[in-house]
Amino acid sequence: GDAEDHRIPTSGGVNADAITVFADLFEVRNQGTQDVDVQVTPLSFIESSGGNTTLIVLVVPQSGFPNVTVSPGNAETYDVLVTATDDATTSTSLSETITVSGEAP
C-alpha cells in the first residue's frame, strides 16, 4: 500500500512533568473495496538527555493496538500521548517521521 509521512506537531509544546493528549490527531480512512490492515511505525519515540528520559511520545489507534483492520468506508482515528518528565526543558524537542501503511489481509 501507499505510505504517507506525518509530522507530530511541535508548536506550542507540552508541560514538563505532565502527560498531554492530542486526541483525534489524524484519521486513516479506507476508500477502497476491501479490508485494509493499517500499521503506523514507529508507535513510540523516546528522547533522552544526560542519561535521563525527558520525553516519551506514543501514537495510539483508538480501536486496536498495535495494528488495526479498517473495512471499506470506515476509518481509524489516532491519538498522540506525550509524557514529559520533570527533566524536560524548553529546549527538549523531538523531530521524527511516522509512516502509515495499509495492506490487504
Image (cartoon, rainbow, N blue to C red):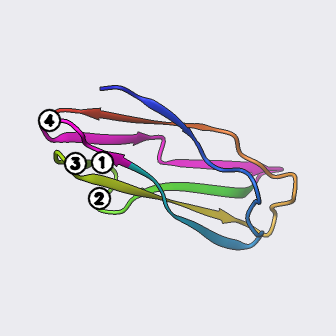
Name the residue rendered at 34%, 51% in the picture. 66
**51 displayed left or right of 79:** right
Farthest right residue in view: 90
Query: What's the mark number on residue 64?
Result: 2
Give whichever of discs 3 and 4 has the lower sequence position.
Answer: 3
Which amino acid, by three-letter code, is at mark 4? Answer: Pro
- Neighbourhood count class around disc 2 (C-alpha, 10 Å): few under 14, some 14–19, many 20 upward: few
The amino acid pointed to by label 3 is: Val
SS at mark 1?
loop
The mark nearer the N terminus, 4 or 2, is 2
Task: Tell me the magenta residue range.
Answer: 28-52
Give amino acid for label 2.
Gly
Q: Which numbered marker is on residue 67?
A: 1
Residue 93: give x, y in percent of width and height.
Answer: 77, 48
Q: Decide: few, some or many residues near mark 1? Use Cα within 10 Å; few <14, some 14-19, many ≥20.
A: some
Distance from Cα at disc 3 to Cα at disc 4: 10 Å
Which label's residue is closer to the chain start, 4 or 1?
1
Which amino acid type is marked by label 1?
Asn
Identified at 17% across, 48% down, the residue is 71
User: Is residue 99 shown in magenta?
Assistant: no
- Residue 1, given in percent of the width and then of the height, sits at 29, 26
Question: For the C terminus, which image quadrant?
Answer: top left
Q: Secondary structure at mark 2?
A: loop
Q: Nearer the viewer, mark 2 or mark 3?
A: 3
Q: Quadrant of residue 19?
A: bottom right
Q: Position of residue 79 (x, y in %)?
A: 47, 60
Give the SS element for disc 4. loop
Residue annotated with mark 3: 70
What residue is shown with label 4?
105
Residue 71 to residue 63: above or below = above
The 10 Å Cα crowd at callout 3, few under 14, some 14 to 19, many 20 or more, is many
Instruction: Name the image quarter holding residue 96.
Output: top right
